[in-house]
Amino acid sequence: MYFLDREDAAHRLADKLQQYRGQHPLVLAIPRGAVPMARSLARTLDGDLDVVLVRKLRAPGNPELAIGSVDESGWSYLADYAHQMAGQSYIDNEKNMQLEVMRSRRTQYTPVRPPLDPAGRIVIVVDDGLATGSTMIAALHAIRARHPQKLICAVPVAPPDTLLKIEPYADEVVCLHVPEAFYAVGQFYSDFPQVSDEQVMELLATR
């Protein structure tokens, strides 16, 4: 299965999430790529849009590879191979660097309002695809701590081993395509441009 772009993926995800229409779900995007998708989902499902800020911890010399992730509270998840690739001092420095990025983004994204409260709500956490799943795990952990009524992970594509890691953190996982041959999220999209901070702010302002 391939997607034309993020909007196409969002429409297909919405079809699988129709049961939540009318229940005023909170749709949370993992910035930046998932924000356009989450806005489309929130509108289709008559829900609210916001972001959940998490960052991957980058492998030494290979910033595209995640060795873990961290949420805004400072809680971190480490992949089982993390310490084979990086020492503790590197991990601590990388965590502090990503916390600073999140503080800056929170100031940019929500300057005049606090994040929407997920307590007691149906919450759908959206990304445009999963590779290692590290950032999704951090996002689900962060939201679970705030006591949602139901916590759903919704993504267009992810490899099977990653979905197995995700399942314990969510009440429901919706994934449209689970390929055995997986190299990168972008390989499953015809059009997969970068999403800028300016686009994120514009989308959140018009939510």
Image: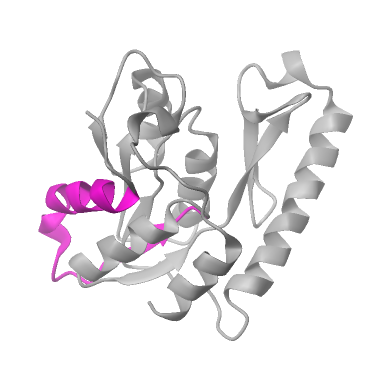
Q: Which residues are magenta?
A: 6-31
Task: Say left or right for 204 vs 188.
Answer: right
Indicate whether residue 24 is drawn in magenta: yes
- Looking at the picture, how far across and down is residue 152, in whole percent? 31, 49
* Image position of 130 with respect to 112: above or below: above
* Image position of 190 with respect to 123: above or below: above
- Give 53 or 34, whichever is nearer the viewer: 34
Q: Residue at x 43, y 32 (%)?
A: 185
* Image position of 202 with respect to 150: above or below: below
Task: Say left or right for 151 vs 58.
Answer: left
- Looking at the picture, how far across and down is residue 10, in whole percent? 26, 52
Q: Residue at x 13, y 51 (%)?
A: 15
Q: How many marks?
A: 0
Q: Residue at x 73, y 48 (%)?
A: 98
Residue 112 placement: quadrant: bottom right
Toward the right, the furthest residue is 89
Residue 24 at least partly seen: yes
Q: Residue at x 39, y 60 (%)?
A: 36
Q: Quadrant of the C terminus?
A: bottom left
- Looking at the picture, how far across and down is residue 86, in whole percent? 79, 21
Indicate whether residue 92 is drawn in magenta: no
Toward the bottom, the furthest residue is 112
Specify the color scheme.
Answer: one colour
- Looking at the picture, how far across and down is residue 40, in whole percent? 28, 63
Residue 77 at least partly seen: no
Residue 138 placement: quadrant: top right
Q: Quadrant of the N terminus?
A: top left
* Image position of 55 with respect to 165: above or below: below
Task: Say left or right for 42 vs 72.
Answer: left
Task: Say left or right for 96 vs 159.
Answer: right
